[in-house]
Amino acid sequence: MCHGVIEPHGLPLERFTVTGQWRDVDWQANAPIDAKATMPDGRDIEGPADLRRALLSAPASSSRR
């Protein structure tokens, strides 16, 4: 729950291990991985493909120099 508030864009990548292996089950918890998140703009995403689409469709930052 806390991770979703602090870093929602990290949850869609939760299915990857530290070495990049794909997994559908959290081996320690022996439970399916929930890779759903709600982005700060309110969009619901699930998985890396949704994250990519959300990031690419986000408006450019106005802080660019």
Image (tube, helix red, strand yellow):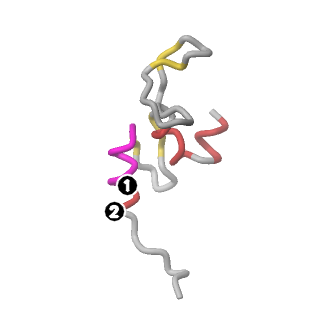
The answer to whether the residue labelled 2 contacts the one labelled 1, judged by CB atoms less than 8 Å apart, is yes
Residue 22, quarter of picture: top left
Q: Is residue 52 above or below residue 33?
A: below
Mark 1, secondary structure of its residue:
helix
Instruction: Residue 46 in the image: state x and y as whole percent.
Output: 39, 37
Give the numbered dot on residue 57: 2
Q: Where is residue 26 in the image (x, y as percent from the top left)?
A: 54, 19
- Name the residue at the front extreme: 19
- Image quadrant holding the N terminus, namely top right
Q: Where is residue 10 in the image (x, y as percent from the top left)?
A: 54, 44
- The residue at 48%/24% (across/down) is 33
Q: Residue at left 46%, top 39%?
A: 12
The amino acid beneath tag 2 is: Ser
In the rendered structure, which amino acid carries the disc numbered 1?
A: Ala
**Is 21 in the magenta?**
no
Q: Residue at 55%, 81% (x, y): give it.
A: 63
Marks 2 and 1 sit apart, C-alpha to C-alpha, by 5 Å
**Residue drawn 39% across the image and 38% down it:** 47
Task: Read off the residue under disc 1.
Answer: 54
Please give left or right for residue 52 compared with residue 38 in the image. Answer: left
Q: Is residue 47 left or right of residue 6?
A: left
The residue carrying pointer 2 sits among few (fewer than 14), some (14 to 19) or many (20 or more) residues within 10 Å by Cα, namely: few
Q: Which residue extends farthest top? A: 30
Mainly helix, strand or loop, the magenta region? Answer: helix
Residue 10 tag number: none
Q: Give the range drawn in magenta.
A: 46-54
As drawn, 6 above or below 58: above
Where residue 38 sits in the image (x, y, percent)?
47, 44
Please tell me whether mark 2 sits on a helix, a strand or a loop. Answer: helix
